[in-house]
Image (tube, rainbow, N blue to C red):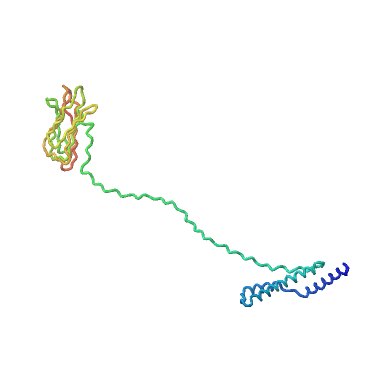
Amino acid sequence: MNSPHQNSQHEDFLRDEMRQALDSRHPDRTAMLNRIAANRAAGPKPRGRVARLAGAALAVATVLGIGGVGKWALADSQDPTPAAPPVATAPATPVPSVVATATAPASREVTSHPRTQAPDETTAPTSAPTPSASPVRGHPGDTQVEKGTLWSDGSIEDSGDSVVTLRAGADLTELDLTVRVPLTPGLSSLGVDSAAGTVTGTVTKQPDALLYRFTLKAGATLPAGEYKFTAKWGGGDRNAADDTYEAYATSVERKRIHIYGNFAPRD
């Protein structure tokens, strides 16, 4: 039976022998691994596939076995030989998938400008509108009793009625006559009287006066001539100096006529 000292010498001898064997043989590990990878990529025929797989496994086992023995032989060596660095295999770099993101265009605020519509054609009126008859002009010292083809006169009858006489030298297509009688104690309206059947009369009571209005009917024509229009009232004796009248008319020549006057002067 060998002593521990003899066993130690025997192990030292084996290590020396293995070191010499390793020094004399340096298998190309990189080349072997590349050859194995190439054989896999070549796609061996099915008939020799088992044999090639067995050979590849044997080669790998040989490399691993030699590496293990080498480590054991160099375990007690004071100047161990550095092991060959492992083959650096570049990791496969994943190709990032490019995701196309459709960016919606920024919405622009559209300000709609309203289109100016051309104004509709309007037909000019055949005559100017009739001005308001109140307040009635024709105060003493401010009269225009004749204009163009139309003449006028204001008078008080014995019965106390206010009469306006119009004398038209041409046919009239429009006529608007107003008689203003200021209110006095006991004064009341008794109606109107018109010498022309195409002229209508109305009476309106205001806070300070009675208004008698005579208007030519729409579409009618007042032939040239002399006409009397009477404003009837009652309530005893009164002074008619403040009574006035005013008329707007249009002749067949389409001429606007404006007249105004008063009645008997103040006593």
- Which quadrant would the N terminus be assigned to in this image? bottom right
Q: Is residue 266 above or below residue 57?
A: above
Name which residue lies at 22% across and 44% down: 125
Q: Is residue 1 above or below residue 258?
A: below
- Which quadrant would the C terminus be assigned to in this image? top left
Q: Quadrant of residue 148?
A: top left
Q: Is residue 100 above or below residue 62?
A: above
From the viewer's perspective, tell me whether residue 210 is left or right of residue 227.
right
Name which residue lies at 18% across and 42% down: 254
From the viewer's perspective, tell me whether residue 206 is left or right of residue 9.
left
Instruction: Locate residue 194, reporting x and y percent.
Output: 13, 33
Q: Nearer the viewer, residue 192 or 237?
A: 192
Q: Quadrant of residue 167?
A: top left
Q: Which residue occupies the extreme front position in the image? A: 1
Q: Is residue 92 visible to the viewer in this orientation of the structure?
A: yes
Q: Nearer the viewer, residue 240 or 176?
A: 176
Q: Is residue 242 above or below residue 8?
A: above
Q: Nearer the viewer, residue 15 or 180?
A: 15
Please give the count of numbered marks on the rendered protein. 0
Instruction: Locate residue 216, reporting x and y percent.
Output: 16, 37
Q: Is residue 141 visible to the viewer in this orientation of the structure?
A: no
Instruction: Locate residue 184, reporting x and y percent.
Output: 20, 23
Instruction: Locate residue 28, reporting x and y percent.
Output: 72, 73
Q: Quadrant of residue 149?
A: top left
